Image: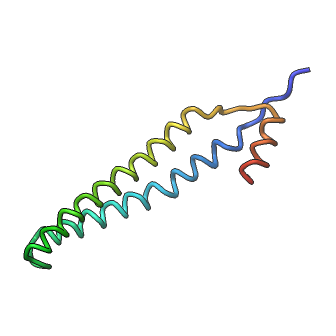
């Protein structure tokens, strides 16, 4: 006898995770980008050390933006790869494994 199929409990958890973290990541990226723009204006700090710091700030801002996009893209990909329906047995395993 085949197992009955039920909604995959992991799918709504992944979707909720995306809805939760996407605005947080975008807010963080925007805040860093805005602070970098403020710094680039030359009104905050000038001189050779400021120029070095500016380069570091650019590199770190780029890394944060890239990392945030990578996280969101990985999560979106996982959502597309997650089955809508699973067996009852698999659903119970997912619930236990991920504490859903």
Image coordinates of residue 31 in percent, x first then y, are 31, 67
Residue furthest bottom as drawn: 44
Image coordinates of residue 73 in percent, x first then y, are 44, 42
Q: Give the position of the N terminus as an image quadrant.
A: top right
Q: Is residue 46 left or right of residue 62?
A: left
Q: Is residue 61 left or right of residue 25?
A: left
Q: Is residue 36 left or right of residue 66?
A: left
Image coordinates of residue 45 in percent, x first then y, are 13, 79
Q: Quadrant of residue 63?
A: bottom left
Vertical comparison of 71 with 87: above or below: below
Vertical comparison of 99 with 45: above or below: above
Residue furthest right as drawn: 1
Q: Quadrant of residue 26?
A: bottom left
Q: Is residue 100 left or right of residue 66?
A: right
State the residue in front, 83 or 57: 57
Image coordinates of residue 36 in percent, x first then y, are 21, 66
Name the colour scheme: rainbow
- Report the residue at 63% width, 46% height from top: 12
Vertical comparison of 92 with 31: above or below: above
Q: Quadrant of residue 92?
A: top right
């Amino acid at each position: 006898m085949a197992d009955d199929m039920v909604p995959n409990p992991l799918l709504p958890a992944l979707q909720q995770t995306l809805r939760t973290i996407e605005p947080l990541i975008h807010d963080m990226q925007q805040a860093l980008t805005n602070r970098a723009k403020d710094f680039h204006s030359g009104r905050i700090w000038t001189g050779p050390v400021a120029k070095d710091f500016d380069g570091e700030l650019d590199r770190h801002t780029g890394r944060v933006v890239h990392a945030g996009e990578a996280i969101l893209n990985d999560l979106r990909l996982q959502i597309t790869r997650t089955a809508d329906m699973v067996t009852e047995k698999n659903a119970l395993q997912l619930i236990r494994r991920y504490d859903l």
